[in-house]
Amino acid sequence: MGDPANKAALYDAFATTGKALGSGKRLELLDLLAQGERTVDALAKAAGLNLTTASAHLQTLKQAGLVTTRREGVRIHYRLAGDDVAALYALLRQVAQRHQAGVDTARTAYLGTDDDPGEEVGREELLARARAGEVVVLDVRPAEEFAAGHVPGALSIPVDQLASRIAELPHDVEVVAYCRGAYCVLAYDAVRLLREQGRRAVRLADGMLEWRLAELPVATGAPA
């Protein structure tokens, strides 16, 4: 039999990853980094944290090997350590929703409820309908996230600009909005706004995180 001390050390090493994931704000930072590389300043702003707190959370994630860094002048850029980290984050959410009753309650409180069961489409259906020219694919994330990776052919209109730019969308084609992932509120807000303005609009059932993990085509570059 193996040495009990070595066994304990091994499980403690596994637990380091679990401890790093044991914070809602650190999970939010992983969610943001799943969209692409970001500076500490940008992460702090997006997550509603001050720089000191954001840096501390990011250091915990780095010590657990979940994120890596690169320096550009005085700026530190963070990114996920690999696609397996994104997959772990996505699986954690799935397990939590499946086994914790409180997750559905919190999800509904945050995202709201769909008005009808036809309000979302799957990834494969979106690909097929977009290729057939049946829908306009609308990315409602911030522009820097769009530039880091988006559904090919998607238009970029951040949700906070959608009301003033709605005329850029054709009237006679259904819009499919998407954002960061299955628990991202931006696409929900976009669909509600579009429908209030009389547009036909639905959501992608999940978002860019799941799109990447499914190894579907991803385009990069800033909006035209």
Image: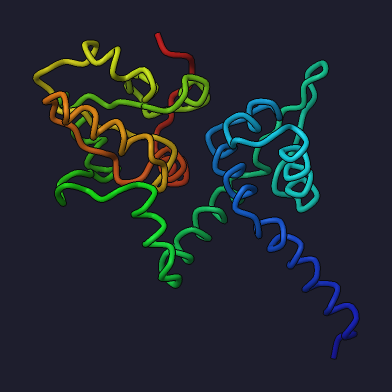
Q: Indicate the position of residue 68 as horizontal and vertical percent values.
A: 74, 39
Q: As displayed, is residue 121 above or below residue 196? A: below
Drawn side of residue 64 relative to residue 101, left or right: right
Drawn side of residue 48 relative to residue 156, left or right: right
Q: Quadrant of residue 184?
A: top left
Q: Is residue 131 visible?
A: no
- Report the number of discs: 0
Q: Give the camera-side residue of 55 and 110.
A: 110
* Residue extending farthest top: 224
Q: As displayed, is residue 168 above or below residue 82? A: above
Q: Give the camera-side residue of 84 and 41.
A: 41
The residue drawn where x is 50% and y is 53% is 90
Q: What colour scheme was applied to this rendering of the protein?
A: rainbow
Drawn side of residue 202 relative to residue 9, left or right: left
The residue drawn where x is 39% and y is 22% is 160
Q: Indicate the position of residue 123 as horizontal and vertical percent values.
A: 30, 42
Q: Give the camera-side residue of 207 and 188.
A: 188
The residue drawn where x is 18% and y is 32% is 201
Q: Indicate the position of residue 104 as horizontal and vertical percent values.
A: 37, 62
Quadrant in which the C terminus is drawn: top left
The residue drawn where x is 76% and y is 53% is 64
Drawn side of residue 170 relative to residue 22, left or right: left
Q: Quadrant of residue 119?
A: top left
Q: Quadrant of residue 21?
A: bottom right
Q: Indicate the position of residue 183 as horizontal and vertical percent values.
A: 41, 47
Quadrant in which the N terminus is drawn: bottom right
Q: Is residue 191 visible?
A: yes
